[in-house]
């Protein structure tokens, strides 16, 4: 394709049309941000960009705005065509943004996600009388598949999909066969069309062509909605399996369509099902769990004992189905096996989750059955009793003990209460009770509050369970800690628990550093806490020195964490201790590669600080380079040199034109407690840690009014006050009421712009 042709295609693309429409938007009290680049990666980045644009253009700070960020931009392919809905995020007044965006550009539609959601922009597509798009209409096909792939019911145990219309099912099969090799089977009740040789004379003389390789990537889109309804045929499944094995030999899990095909293989009892499942490995656990058999039990057990949490859940589910239906006895048996095989502690947490899910599902099933029985009895009485028929409109339905009798608020507390109960349930082995105690740590107060919505007897039992839990908690949790291998956001969510360290915490953190199985994220988390609290020592350093060259020199992104790269922290510790290894570490940092280290090299200056390091850091800060913790490091370094609190160092920078205002605001809040600095790249509006620091800065008696105003702004913008349901861990009603009262008491105080 020539340059002119490519340019013309780009001008006709979805992206070009949307950009042209986007440039027409904006007006009174509503603005749109320019289309994004990679620096606007999250919603927080979008709000920061809006603040900068408002300041530059003189737009009132309370104006509303809309934008999309780089993650949303993935909706466009390389040619600028939409491959999914474009999510448009916003800030300010929802009604103003709705009016400002309008109906979207011609040929497109906007779906309003509501005051707590994003707007979704997509193409308007045409369908036939059966509601089906032209197969060549990529947007129409995508939208149909998205609708068919949306569950009609989702529970912890199963996902259900609405039955397709006959026309939709035929359409799906047709599209799949368009992509498969071989002759298409005749439709049911019809004969395969005959070929008239006189119509195709070339066919008798030309040699047959090799069948085209199937397009498995495209086929996966149609496989899923068919098998969701158990509609893949044995012929389709067999051909997909052959093509899958050929195209993805040795890496079967790399194909996006493997799960529905494995479901179909197991459902159809294909002889190769188990070989395929074994080749896929633990990733296939959730599929095997839906097909109970001795073979699936054997595979899942092996994967579970190796430490896979998904396999543990599947193993428990099938063990109950085949061997032991009692949920507690099944959990006890499996917990014992996990302990005997020294499986990781995280497997006990997965087993606890499986137990909790199973009991909740059993309860829902029993309640639904009780309700059906009660309704059947009532209908029978109405049929037999003439008087009952006359008063049918006013007769009250029977009260059924369970979900219907309690109501939604109390019912929402049941999973939390179950976890509290498990922690002191003698039917469960200690490893499961320890897992329950850890899981209930941030929810026990919500159980206490929910007790007020239960009946008197249920409330008394719930409060008694809370008391038993609190009496046993410290013993159960002694010498334990969080899962260091999980999602980094989960570790950030509980970071506030480590604002002060108990002797048991220090021992656990040191033990994790000395454990060779602790990965780079675990090392980063534990070492940062020990270093910031002044608890890291020579033994901790030397425990990690044998690993630093092979393991700690790898890239580990800390954009969304409250801790730094572990090699940064280790270098600071070595410098503070004047350890001989410091020279080797500094020599490695001085090398030009690997490139990932260059943006964070200067963060090592916090170790053994001096004026030369402070000057080098400051030179970078005023150079307008990308800040990845540099100002934070300089403030903490300067505070150590001046023997003062870092808050007083940070507040002296207010109004300095050489410092980015939004970076300074984040640093001012992040250094409020120098024993646990917060290194997240932005003020995290979901975090308990950032909320508490914002409050402390806002109320600090020795800070200037300008500094306190920054703290107040951060607090007012925090989700605790704006979107409390998004705060993690979930707030109790008491915490939320206290936060609102705190904000109300300061309503007359000015906040920073």
Image (cartoon, rainbow, N blue to C red):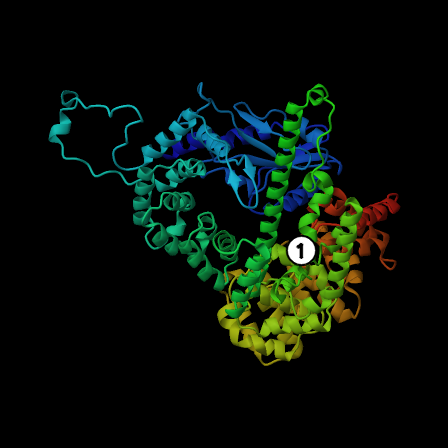
Vertical relation: 679 (above or below) 662: below
Quarter of the image for residue 671 reads bottom right
Asked if residue 120 shows in the view, the reply is yes
User: 501 or 8: which is nearer to us?
Assistant: 501
Residue 570, given in percent of the width and then of the height, sits at 60, 71
Q: Regarding mark 1 in the picture, which secondary structure is present there?
A: helix
In the rendered image, the quadrant that contains the C terminus is: top right
Residue 626, given in percent of the width and then of the height, sits at 61, 54
User: 512 or 138: which is nearer to us?
Assistant: 512
In the rendered image, the quadrant that contains the N terminus is: top left
**Measuring 52% from the left and 43% from the top, which residue is drawn there?**
158
Residue 45, given in percent of the width and then of the height, sits at 64, 46
User: 561 or 242: which is nearer to us?
Assistant: 242
Vertical relation: 195 (above or below) 250: above
Quarter of the image for residue 261 reads top left
Task: State left or right for residue 290 relative to residue 249.
Answer: right
Q: Mark 1 points at which residue?
A: 419
**Measuring 77% from the left and 57% from the top, which residue is drawn there?**
464
Quarter of the image for residue 573 reads bottom right
């Amino acid at each position: 394709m020539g340059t002119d042709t490519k340019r013309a295609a780009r001008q006709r693309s979805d992206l070009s049309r949307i950009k042209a429409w986007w440039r027409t938007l904006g007006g009174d009290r509503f603005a749109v941000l320019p289309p994004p680049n990679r620096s606007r990666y999250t919603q927080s980045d979008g709000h920061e960009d809006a603040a900068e644009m408002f300041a530059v253009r003189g737009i009132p700070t309370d104006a509303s705005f809309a934008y999309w960020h780089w993650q949303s931009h993935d909706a466009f392919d390389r040619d600028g065509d939409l491959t999914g809905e474009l999510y448009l995020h916003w800030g300010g007044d929802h009604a103003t943004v709705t009016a400002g965006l309008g109906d979207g550009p011609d040929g497109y539609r906007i779906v309003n996600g509501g005051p707590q959601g994003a707007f979704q922009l997509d193409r308007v597509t045409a369908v036939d009388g059966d509601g089906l798009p032209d197969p060549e209409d990529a947007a129409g096909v995508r939208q149909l598949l998205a609708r068919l792939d949306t569950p009609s019911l989702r529970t912890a145990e199963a996902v259900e999909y609405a039955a397709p219309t006959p026309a939709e099912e035929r359409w799906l099969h047709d599209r799949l066969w368009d992509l498969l090799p071989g002759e298409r089977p005749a439709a049911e009740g019809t004969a395969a069309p005959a070929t008239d040789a006189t119509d195709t004379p070339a066919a008798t003389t030309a040699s047959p062509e090799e069948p085209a390789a199937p397009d498995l990537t495209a086929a996966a889109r149609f496989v899923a909605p068919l098998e969701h309804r158990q509609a893949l045929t044995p012929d389709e499944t067999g051909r997909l399996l052959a093509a899958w094995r050929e195209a993805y030999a040795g890496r079967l899990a790399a194909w996006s369509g493997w799960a529905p095909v494995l479901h179909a293989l197991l459902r159809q009892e294909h002889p190769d099902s188990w070989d395929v499942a074994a080749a896929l490995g633990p990733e296939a656990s959730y599929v095997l769990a839906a097909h109970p058999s001795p073979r699936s039990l054997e595979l899942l057990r092996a994967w579970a004992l190796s430490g896979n949490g998904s396999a543990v859940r599947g193993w428990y589910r099938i063990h109950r189905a085949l061997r032991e239906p009692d949920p507690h006895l099944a959990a006890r048996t499996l917990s014992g096996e996990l302990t005997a095989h020294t499986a990781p502690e995280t497997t006990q947490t997965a087993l606890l989750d499986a137990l909790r899910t199973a009991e909740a599902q059993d309860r829902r099933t029993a309640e639904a059955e009780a309700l059906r029985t009660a309704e059947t009895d009532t209908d029978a009485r109405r049929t037999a009793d003439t008087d009952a028929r006359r008063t049918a409109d006013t007769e009250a339905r029977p009260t059924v003990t369970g979900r219907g009798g309690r109501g939604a608020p109390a019912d929402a507390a049941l999973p939390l209460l179950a976890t509290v109960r498990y922690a002191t349930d003698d039917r469960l082995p200690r490893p499961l009770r320890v897992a329950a105690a850890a899981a209930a740590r941030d929810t026990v107060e919500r159980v206490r509050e929910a007790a007020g919505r239960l009946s008197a007897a249920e409330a008394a039992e719930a409060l008694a369970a809370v008391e038993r839990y609190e009496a046993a908690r410290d013993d159960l949790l002694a010498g334990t800690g969080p899962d260091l291998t999980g999602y980094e956001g989960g570790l950030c969510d509980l970071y506030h628990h480590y604002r002060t360290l108990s002797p048991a915490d220090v021992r656990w953190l040191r033990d994790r550093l000395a454990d060779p199985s602790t990965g780079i994220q675990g090392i980063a988390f534990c070492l940062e806490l020990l270093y910031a609290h002044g608890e890291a020592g020579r033994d901790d350093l030397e425990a990690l020195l044998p690993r630093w060259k092979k393991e700690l020199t790898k890239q580990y992104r800390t954009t969304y964490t409250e801790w730094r790269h572990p090699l940064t922290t280790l270098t600071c510790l070595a410098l503070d201790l004047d350890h001989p290894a410091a020279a080797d570490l500094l020599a490695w940092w001085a090398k030009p590669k690997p490139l990932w280290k260059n943006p964070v090299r200067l963060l090592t200056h916090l170790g053994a600080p001096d004026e030369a390091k402070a000057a080098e850091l400051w030179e970078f800060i005023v150079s307008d380079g990308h800040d990845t913790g540099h100002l934070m490091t300089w403030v903490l370094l300067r505070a150590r040199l001046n023997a003062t609190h870092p808050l007083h160092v940070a507040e002296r920078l207010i109004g300095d034109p050489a410092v980015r205002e939004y970076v300074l605001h984040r640093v001012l809040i992040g250094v409020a407690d120098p024993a646990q600095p917060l290194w997240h790249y932005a003020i995290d509006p979901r975090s308990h840690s950032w909320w508490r620091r914002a409050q402390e800065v806002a109320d600090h008696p020795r800070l200037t009014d300008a500094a306190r105003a920054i703290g107040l702004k951060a607090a007012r913008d925090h989700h605790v006050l704006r979107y409390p349901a998004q705060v993690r861990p979930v707030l109790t009603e008491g915490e939320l009421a206290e936060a609102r009262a705190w904000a109300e008491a300061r309503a007359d105080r000015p906040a920073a712009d």
